[in-house]
Image: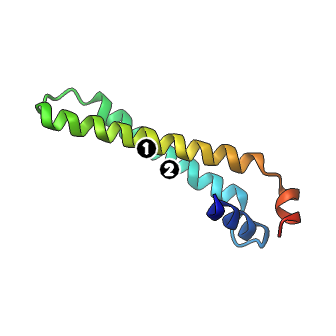
Amino acid sequence: MDWVETMLKKSCEKTLTKGEVLHSLFHMIEINEKTMDQIQNDKNDFGPELEELKQTEIRDLDFHLKYYRGLVNYINSITENSMIKNR
């Protein structure tokens, strides 16, 4: 998570705000959720090979969603004061 801390330090320097970072992560979550919904709701039968690819894509999207949500939780747990002290 070093890059997250670097981003938050930049936030203290006013080059990137905590809100901007969170906004970006929420946007990525939204995109991944929409993509997952589209894939899961597609009822076309493409055969077993493409079904396997579809399931792989769903697992990948699920991983990314968990990762982005974890980052949101991590960033929300850091107070502005602790970011300033660690600079």
Q: Secondary structure at mark 1?
A: helix
> Quarter holding the C terminus?
bottom right
* Rendered position, 86 above or below 70: below
**Quick one: 1 or 41, which is closer to the camera?**
1
Residue at 62%, 64% (x, y): give it: 3
Q: Is residue 66 left or right of residue 53?
A: right
Q: Residue at x 50, y 50 (%)?
A: 28
Point out residue 83 in the picture as x, y percentages from the top left corner.
82, 61
Callout 1 amino acid: Asn
Q: Secondary structure at mark 2?
A: helix
Image quarter of the N terminus:
bottom right
**Residue at the image point whose x is 16% and y is 38% from the top:** 50
Which residue appears farthest toward the front when viewing the image? 2
Along the line of sight, the residue nearer the viewer: 59 or 24: 59
Instruction: Assess disc 2: are there few (<14), some (14-19) or many (≥20) residues with their C-alpha within 10 Å of its C-alpha.
Output: some
Dot label at residue 32: 1
Where residue 65 appears, x then y in whole percent?
Answer: 49, 41
Q: Which residue is mark 2?
A: 28
Q: Is residue 62 above or below residue 74?
A: above
- Please rate how many residues cluster around mark 1, counting C-alpha atoms within 10 Å: few if below 14, some from 14 to 19, many from 20: some
Q: Quadrant of residue 34?
A: top left
Residue 32 image position (x, y, % from top left): 43, 44
Q: Amino acid at mark 2?
A: Met
**Residue 27 placement, left or right of 47:** right
